[in-house]
Amino acid sequence: MRLTDCHNYQDFRRLAKKRLPGPIFHYIDGAADDEITYRRNTSSFDDVDLVPNVLAGVENVDMSVEVMGQKLDMPIYCAPTALQRLFHHEGERAVAKAATKHGTMFGVSSLATVTVEEIEKLAPGPKMFQFYFHKDRGLNDALLERARAANFNVMALTVDTITGGNRERDLRTGFTSPPKLTPASALSFATHPAWAWNFFTKEKFDMPHLSGHVSAGTNLAVSVGEYFSTMLDQSMNWNDAEKLCAQWNGQFALKGIMSVEDAKRAVDIGCTGIMVSNHGGRQLDGSRAPFDQLAEICDAVGDQIDVICEGGIQRGTHVLKALSAGAKACSGGRLYLYALAAAGQAGVDRALGNLRTEIERDMKLMGVTSLDQLNRDNLRLR
């Protein structure tokens, strides 16, 4: 299977599975407990049908949106994800370049493997910094100030990782960051020589935003769940979020909002956006899918704050359903991580290009020339 054979999300997933050692692939692919919420994130879109209109003169369509003050050429952006140089040696550099080419936003994690300073040079377009609230207040201040100095446009505080989810695939494979050499992992690395050569011969794996503050995940191998449970501040509350919002003093979002009550609180503390998200099903299994919660959250706060639907999106029609329900835009992680693992920058470019083509085609088939023409009249519950 080659990159040219990748026409959709599942194709990229299959190619990524061929290219990656088992523990690395299952880190991307896995979720919490029985992975019910993970599967529901996508299947929830199947419960709602699109109702198209015709004869609408759709030769030219505009798929641009404005989200948290940022003009995006397409209504989906690359959500921040950690550890990207584990999946492909180009890591965040590849995603930054591809997102810039497609005129969309790139989210960079606190646990990134490339610095915000380098990303600023590679990606002149809209950039989001994803903030993990650590026990180490000096680290928190350093993260915020580095993102500010690197001219990031949006700060997003992740609020659904107060402790690590039960990611049983990682427990079975022994996944850690950085990867530990064990008999089982050595065999997996040996059967994926291209990945192993790039990982072990190119620049040393690092999470540079944490270096000098914590050793976990950089010099000391830990699981991501263990990192969340030991390094992040479990006492974080609404007062902390409000102070961080004021300290940033710009476009500020909460990532991981799932209830109407919390969406309203986000408005109250001065947020300009929220990501309706369950962390890709990787935290609380049995929680609702973002799309299932979207309409009631948009009804409550959609006129006061930008609502993003994040999770489970694999198709252009998923994006149009979310926008019809009231979302301003969508975001996703696995939708470009599989592509990154499959073929680096060329893979991410192709994945985003596929989505762009689908959204444009589906807008024409829906009979809309701009995304603001989408509304609940376009949807029917099964």
Image (tube, helix red, strand yellow):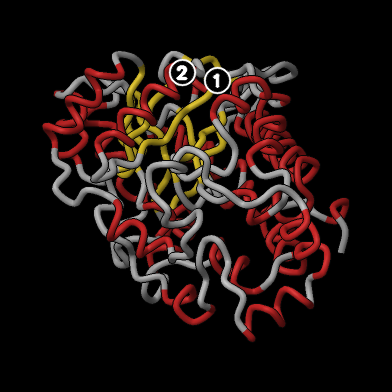
Query: Quick check: can you spot residue 165?
Result: yes
Instruction: Decide which of 246, 217 is in the foreground and name it.
Output: 217
Residue 140: name its quadrant: top left
Q: Vertically, is 58 above or below 235?
A: above
Q: Percent x, y for residue 131?
A: 37, 36
Q: Percent x, y for residue 308?
A: 40, 34
| Dot 1: element | loop
Residues marked 2 and 1 touching at CB (< 8 Å): yes
Query: Quick check: can you spot residue 64?
Result: no
Q: Residue at x 68, y 36 (%)?
A: 93
**Image position of 115 (left or right of 374):** right
Q: Percent x, y for residue 99?
A: 66, 30
Q: Which quadrant of the rendered structure holds the C terminus?
A: bottom left
Label placed on residue 15: none
**Image position of 314 (left or right of 327):** right
**Image position of 95 (left or right of 112):** right
Q: Amino acid at mark 2?
A: Asn
Q: Residues within 10 Å of mark 2 (few under 14, many from 20)?
A: some
Label placed on residue 153: 2
* Residue pointed to by mark 1: 126
Q: Vertically, is 105 above or below 176?
A: above
Q: Amino acid at mark 1?
A: Pro
Q: Which of the two discs, 2 and 1, labels the residue nearer the N terminus?
A: 1
Residue 213: name its quadrant: top left
| Dot 2: element | loop
Q: Vertically, is 345 above or below 35?
A: above
Q: Residue at x 47, y 43 (%)?
A: 211
